[in-house]
Amino acid sequence: MNIENTTALVTGGNRGIGAAFVLALLEAGAKKVYACCRDPNAPDLEIDSDDERVELVALDVTDEARINELAANIDDVQLLVNNAGYFAGTTLMTAPDMSAVRREMDTNFFGPLMLSRAFAPQMAANGGGAIVNVLSAAAIVPIPNMGGYSPSKFAARAMGVSLRAELADQGTQVHNLIVGSVDTRMASHVAGAKETPATIAKAGLRAVKKNLPEVDTDSFAVAVRAAQARDPALQERQLAAMLKMETISTGR
């Protein structure tokens, strides 16, 4: 898929990886980018809202009615970047109730699914287009100290594979991005070397241009997959040990 002159919608587009996607799309020649976030008036915007090609849109990806309203009011989306995510910072057993894991599933799985269902028909009408799911290394290996985040990303990865099969006949590409450790607010508790959000966005657009179904976007994601292939039992023990660590580090 050629990015030039396309119209894209990016969730969580106000900062971090989402903002990097907005910038990368503009640099690649996108005609218009809907940068979605819960509060377009928040002071922490990391995008140039004065760029005439950018339209800030209020969107909570857990709100199905708002998603459907948005899809009914715009009809030019060709590229959907499901980037918005939530990490509760708790584990499955230490969380005081089920609200944290439910929010992680609502944001990281049901949200992208609802968006894909809402915008796939207009992408078909606009020539096919593409869906990009920003996932995590936690989508290919269960990470105990990440609570419901890892299971939600596993579910989102499976969703991407299923959507790829379902949408193939309408010409819509579906891409799963396996992201390692990135310098964002969500990963502020992690020590060690981290990739820039721009690196992830660049890898994501490359996946779209070359129609790559699943991409490890950075060296940390590659290392996680390699460790899984070498010795999955050892990797599981190492990940379990993270539950007792005071400081989590990329090890780089």
Image (spheres, rainbow, N blue to C red):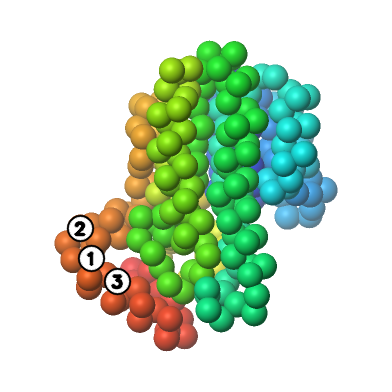
Which amino acid does the dot numbered 3 rest on? Answer: Glu
SS assignment at label 3: helix
Query: Counting other residues with Cα less than 10 Å from the Cα at mark 1, is it few (<14), some (14-19), or many (20 or more)?
Result: some
What's the mark number on residue 236?
Answer: 3
**Lateral position of residue 6 relative to residue 226, left or right:** right
Which amino acid does the dot numbered 1 rest on? Answer: Pro
Which amino acid does the dot numbered 2 rest on? Answer: Ala
**Which is more N-terminal, label 2 or label 3?**
2
Question: Which residue is tagged 2?
Answer: 229
Q: Distance between the residues labelled 3 and 1?
A: 6 Å
**Lateral position of residue 129 relative to residue 69, left or right:** left
What residue is at 47 percent from the left and 51 percent from the top? 155
Which residue is the extreme one toward the right?
Answer: 41
Residue 137 location (% of width, % of height): 39, 57
Q: Distance between the residues labelled 1 and 2?
A: 6 Å
What's the mark number on residue 232?
Answer: 1
Q: Please identify the quadrant where the C terminus is shown.
A: bottom left
